[in-house]
Image: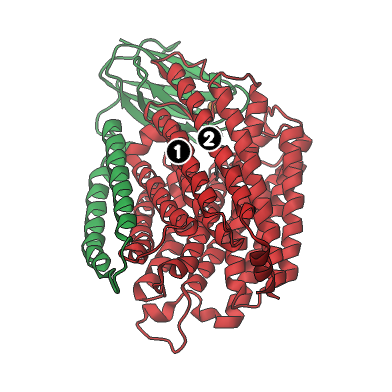
Amino acid sequence: MLKIAGLVTLILDIILVLTTVFLMWSARKAVEHGNKPVYKVRAYYAPALIIALIAIFAFTITRMPYRALALTPPAATVKVTGHMWYWQFEQEGQPALGALPKGEVIEFAVTAADVNHGFGVFDPDGHIVGQTQAMPGYTNRVRMVLEKPGLYHVLCMEYCGLVHQAMIGFLTVE
Amino acid sequence: MEKRNRNATIAWLVVSFAVFIVMIGLGITMRLAQGLRIEIPPNTFYALMTMHGLGMAGGLFAGALSIIWYIISRTCKVSLAVSWFSWVLFLIGAVALLYATLIGGFGPGWYALYPLPFINAAWPSWATGVAIIALLIMGVSWLLYQLDMLRAMAAQYGASRLLAWEYIAGKKPAEPLPAVILIASMCAIAGALGTLSGAVTLILYLLKWISPGVSLDALLLKNTMFMFGHVIVNVCIYCGLCAVYHLMPKYSGRPWGVNRITAIAWNATLFFVLFAYFHHLYMDFAQNKALHIIGQITSYGSAIPATAVSLFGIASQVYKSGMKWRFTPTAFVLGGMGWAIGGVAAVVDSTIMVNSYFHNTLWVPAHFHTYFLVGYIFMFFGFLHDFFNSKAERFAISSFVGMLVGGYGFLSMFYLGGYYGVPRRYAAYTAIQVGDIANKGALFASLGALFAAVFLLSAIAFAISLFAGRSKATAEAVATT
Ligand code: HEM
Ligand SMILES: [Cu+2]
C-alpha cells in the first residue's frame, strides 16, 4: 500500500514537472490564440480526472480501517490507554498482557487518560501496521492482524507534550 | 489614495516577509536538533515548533490578505483605517505570541489539541493565557480586515454578484466581474468563516483557562480547530492565486476573465475548502463515519477545480504565448507547479486507506510545506517582484534557482521521512528502537537542515534583489502612479 502511494506520488510529480517544463519551453514563440490546444486537452482531462477519482474512491472507500475485519471475531481484545507519557495495555479476562497470537485478528480498544495520544503500531522491521487516535472521553476500536512474530513497538502518533518522542510501548507476538 | 494604499500594503508585506525569514530560522533549528547536530531540550523544541507553525501560518496568511486587499483596492473603496487598525492588532498579537512561546515556553503545537495546553504543561499557566489572548487578537484583526474587504467589494459590485452566480446561471452580465473579485470574495468569505471557527475555539479555551473546572469535549474542539487551521492555510494559497490571476495577463498579453466554468470552479472550491478538514480526523474512529467519507469526497473534489481551472488557466496563459521568462511569471508558473505537487501528496494522503499509514508521519509536514514553500511563497515573491517594480531580473532569477534547489531538497527529506514511517513532531528520534527509523530520521533531518539553509540564503538574496536594481527613476515613477 505504502509502496503504491509513494510510487503514484512520484510518477504524478514527474509528470507535473515535465508538463511545466514543456509549457515554459512552448512559450518561446508567440502564436495568436495559440492556447486553443490547452482547452482541447482540458476537455479530455476533466472527465478523465473525475472518472479516475471516482474509481479510486470506490476502490479505497470499501477498505476503510473503521470496519476492517468486522466479520471475524477477534482472537484477543486489548484495552489500550495512553497516559502522559506511557502506554497501558490490559487484556480482557487476563491478569496481564501476554503474547498476542500471530496472524489472528486483534482488537484494540484505545482511549487516553489525560490528553490526546496516537496509538501507532510498528512491526518488528519498523513498518507501520496501523494506527488510531487515543482521545480522552472516547474509545476508538481498531482491528489488526499482526503477521510477523516478534516485538512490535507502539509509538505515539499524536503530539502529547514534553516526552511525546519517547512514549513507547511493546507488544509481543508469537 | 493609491500611494496611501500602497503604504498600508507595504506595512503588511514587510511584516509577513520578516516573519517568514525568522520562522525559517526556527525551522532550521528544529531540523538540526532532530538531526542531532545541535542539542536543545524537548520543551524548547516544542515551543519553537509551536511558534514556527503559528508564525508561518499566521504571518503568511496576514500577508496574503494584504495582497488581495491591494488588488481590490484598485477598484473598491477599502478602508485604510481598518487596514492599519488590523495591522496594529496583528502586531500586538504576534509580539504577545512570540513572548508566550519563546519566553514563556508555550508549546502545545500549532493546533494545541484540547486539553493539552491545560494539563501537565511544561510551561507556566500564564504563557497559555497570553498565547490564547494573542491568537484571539490576531483573529479579531483578520476578521475585521476580511469583513471590510467584503463590505468594499459588495459596495462596488453588489453583494449578490460577488460569487459570480449570474455566470453560473448562464447570464452574460452587462458589466463583467473581474476574476480577482470572485477569488478575493471567496477568500474573504471562507477566511472569515474559518477565523470565526478559530475564535469560537479560542474563546472556549479562554474559558477553560479562567475556570479550570470547566470540561470541554476533545473531539468537538478538534473539529473546530481544524476547520480553522485547514481553511486559513488554504485561503492563503488562494490569495496567492488571486495575485497570479491578476498579474499573469500583464506578462502573457492574454486576458483571464470569469466565465461559467471559472465561476463554478471557485464556488466549488469555497464549498470544498470548508468541508475538507474532516480528513484531519480520519484516525478518530469515534467520529461519525459519514464525516470521514465526506472528508475523502471533498478532498478529492478540491483537486478538480484546482487543476482543471486554475492550473489549466495558467497553462493557457503560457502555452505559445511568447512570454519572456522574467522573474514574476516564472515564479508564478513554478509556484503553480509546487502547489500541484503538494496537492498530489495531499490527495494521496486524503485517501482514508492510505492515511492509516501516513497520518502524523513526516508525510504531513511534507505536503503542506510543499504547498507553501514552493507554492504560495513563489506566488508571494512573484507578486513582490512586480509590486516593487524590481529591476534586478538576473539577481532575482539566480536567487530563485537557489530556492528551487534548497526548497525541493528540504521537502524531499520530509517525504522520505514520511515514506519510512518517521513520526512528525518528535524532538528527537533517538528513543525509537524499531527498524532503522531513528537513523533514517536523523539523517533526513540533517540533510533537510542543509537544504533549508540554502533556501534561507536564497530568500534573503531575493529580498535584496527587490531593491538592488531599483533605479531612482523607477522609484519615483512608482511613487507617483
Ligand atoms: C525552509 C523553511 C522551513 C523549514 C526549515 C521548516 C521546518 C519545519 C520543521 C522542522 C517542522 C517540524 C516538523 C516535525 O517534526 O513535525 C515544521 C513544522 C511546521 N511548519 Fe515548517 N518549515 C519551513 C517552512 C514553513 C512554511 C513556509 C510554513 C507555512 C505554513 C511552515 C509551517 C509549518 C507548520 C504549520 C508546522 C507544524 C507545526 C506543528 O506541528 O505544530 N513551515 N517546519
Ligand atoms: Cu504523544
Indicate the amino acid at tag 1.
Answer: Val
Q: Residue at x 26, y 52 (%)?
A: A53
In the figure, the red chain has which letter? B
Q: Which is nearer the N-term, disc 1 or disc 2?
A: 1
Which residue occupies the foreground of this view, B46 or B184? B184
Query: Marks 1 and 2, how far apart in space?
Result: 8 Å
Side of B393 relative to B467 (left or right): left
Side of B115 relative to B429 (left or right): right
Q: Percent x, y for residue A163?
A: 60, 21
* Residue at numbered disc 2: B454
Say if residue B282 shows up in the picture: yes
Q: Percent x, y for residue A62?
A: 25, 43
Indicate the amino acid at tag 2.
Answer: Val
* Circle on res. B405: 1
In the figure, the green chain has which letter? A
Taking the view exactly as shown, the residue that stands out farthest to the bottom is B174
Which residue occupies the foreground of this view, B445 or A83? B445
Q: Quadrant of residue A113?
A: top right
Quarter of the image with the N terminus of chain A is top left
